[in-house]
Image (cartoon, rainbow, N blue to C red):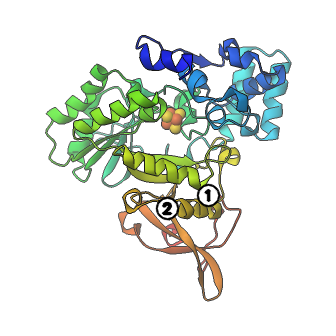
Amino acid sequence: MTEQQTIWSVNETTSIQSYTLANFRTIPQIQQLSEEAKFEMEVVGNVLPFKTNNYVVEQLIDWNNIPKDPMFVLTFPQKGMLIPEHYEKMASVLRSGADKKEIQNTANKIRLQLNPHPAGQMELNIPQLKDGTKLFGMQHKYQETCLFFPSQSQTCHAYCSFCFRWPQFVGMDEMKFAMREGEQLVQYLKEHQEITDVLFTGGDPMIMKASMFSVYTDALLDAKLPNLKTIRIGTKAISYWPTEPIKEAIKRVRKTGAQIRTQSPLLTHINDDADLWAEMWQKQVSLGCIPYYMFVVRDTGAQHYFGVPLVKAEKIFRSAFKHVSGLARTVRGPSMSATPGKVHVLGISEINGQKVIALQLLQGRNPDWVGIPFFAKYDENAIWLDDLQPAFEEKFFFEG
Ligand code: SF4
């Protein structure tokens, strides 16, 4: 055990310190990097969100393996995350010594070209109370599940550089989802008896103190809503903290009767390796967690940098899946959270001599779409649903 590990696992008073663009140059390990590398981080970090912390820096990143270390790529801005045109635009603004306002304007112009609202989330999913009040802190995309974004959970312990929620973290206020009141959530559930699941999300809702979190959950429980069957919490908290304490935390969470289901995106530069996925699913099962989803990188932000072609993603999934026991085969994927719903890449097949990609919807904007197999032309370069062409028809069946 290294001295640092001793500090993190034994000294419970070790406190978390956040690092952002404003202070990342004070990190001793960053000071060892070239000025050029630090400037690159500044260029990208002025467009996409960046926040990490001393635990990630000291315990999770292998500084002997920079710039390739996956945890480094996962948490620090990388030059390739901006296409060259955008990178050069921001780099020249910074080099010119521009003021904050000009930097912000340039950043916002670039951000608007990065598809900040994938899957129609600003237009299609915002629910409304019967009195006409729009609930910007909620999304209701699938019949039985609504997403709730408490205003206090609009951040995370450290930002993931691939995050599809990046617009929420960069101060573009009109893009920010947040809701302060639990009462409106309760009212919406009363008006929508079809909803059985509420999913708390963010940012990361586990950034909230328990006392703050319970204001929302108590409001739901006190209302004794007959339709509400499950409260879900979407968090990466238990995947980011020290190993031994996390095992204990998982035990305690499971002791309450709660289940832990796991999901992760498949990312170039980080985890596009079947053995790694198989090992992760097995580990999760041994800790009593249930593997749930392998996701495909969404069509926003740095998709060009992290995206894995669907054909390759399916190969990685299948290769990992066949090496784990039935207990880990609860996992589904590769799955795309696209505009019509959650699209599952089932596999590669051949029909009447034509090579095709077989797909289905695991969740649909229209519930009748779920589970119907459909086929796309085989395309090794496609990284998203929009890149695919129907194999036998003009349009996919959900395109009307
Ligand atoms: S919302 Fe989730 S994916 Fe995005 S930065 Fe936070 S923890 Fe990472």
Task: Name the side, left or right, on which 201 lies relative to 30.
Answer: left
Three-letter amino acid code of the residue under disc 1: Trp
Check the image and name the residue furthest to the bottom: 352
Q: Amino acid at mark 2?
A: Phe
Q: Dot 1 lies on which element?
A: loop
In the displayed structure, 35 sits above or below 72; it is above
The quarter of the picture where residue 270 lies is top right
At x 61%, y 49%, the residue is 299
Q: Which mark is residue 384?
A: 1
Q: Residue at position x 53%, y 21% from top?
A: 55
* x and y percentages locating residue 250 in the rendered image: 34, 36
Relative image position of residue 153 (x, y in whole percent): 41, 27
User: What whole-number distance in Å separates the C-alpha atoms at marks 1 and 2?
Assistant: 22 Å
Residue on which the image places disc 2 = 321
Closer to the camera, 280 or 295? 280
- Foreground pick, 115 / 165: 165
The answer to whether 21 appears left or right of 160 in the picture is right
Q: Which residue is at a point 51% across and 50% down the rendered structure image?
A: 279
Answer few, some or many: residues within 10 Å of disc 2's Cα (few below 14, many 20 plus, some between 14 and 19). Answer: many
| Residue 253 visible in the current orientation | yes
